[in-house]
Image: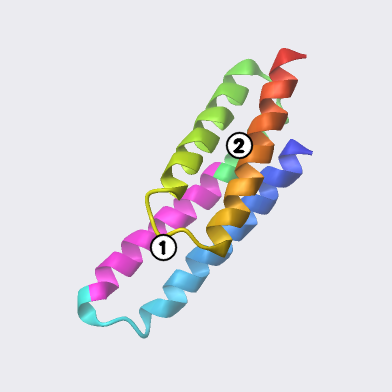
Amino acid sequence: MAQALFFLNAAIWLLFGVSSVLRLTSATSGHALTAVVVATLMFGNAAAMLWSGVAIGQRQKRFYALALAVLLINIVLTFTDQFGLFDLLTLLIDVALLGILLASARA
């Protein structure tokens, strides 16, 4: 279940990144650099989510710890920008994943 949610989260962030790149064509020169940075961060987040999904399949505590770190960073960063519907969606997935990982660590 956790792997599937990590993969879903990775797909969402990949779509966000692609959407940001597509918006680059309409960005003014002053905002183009910002759009590139934002898209790069979104692709990085997608990669971190994908890696976390693959890594927890190894069932090693160090990978659980790193996956938890990815989730916690993602949760904190969700509140540092404008909060909208898509932020709520990823936040709910992140919180569900956090609960699953914490419950499985205790088992």
Q: Residue furthest left?
A: 30
Q: Which residue is found at the position 60% from the left and 37% from the top?
A: 52
Residue 53 appears in the rendering: no
The residue to which callout 1 is attached is 39
Residue 52 is tagged as: 2
Residue 2 appears in the rendering: yes
Q: Amino acid at mark 2?
A: Ser
* Residue 68, image x, y percentages: 56, 29
> Is residue 39 inside the magenta stretch?
yes
Q: Which residue is found at the position 22% from the left and 80% from the top?
A: 29
Is 58 situated left or right of 44 in this image? right
Give the quarter of the figure containing the C terminus: top right
Extent of the magenta region: 31-48
How is this picture coloured? rainbow
Q: Earlier in the sequence, mark 1 or mark 2?
A: 1
Is 26 situated left or right of 85 in this image? left
Q: Residue furthest top?
A: 106
Res 38 → quadrant: bottom left
Q: Amino acid at mark 1?
A: Ala
Q: Main secondary structure of the magenta part?
A: helix
Res 67 → quadrant: top right
Residue 72 is tagged as: none
> Is residue 58 inside the magenta stretch?
no
* Residue 39, image x, y percentages: 41, 63
User: For mark 2, does the 10 Å Cα neighbourhood hold few (<14), some (14 to 19), or many (20 or more) residues?
Assistant: many
User: For mark 1, does the 10 Å Cα neighbourhood hold few (<14), some (14 to 19), or many (20 or more) residues?
Assistant: many
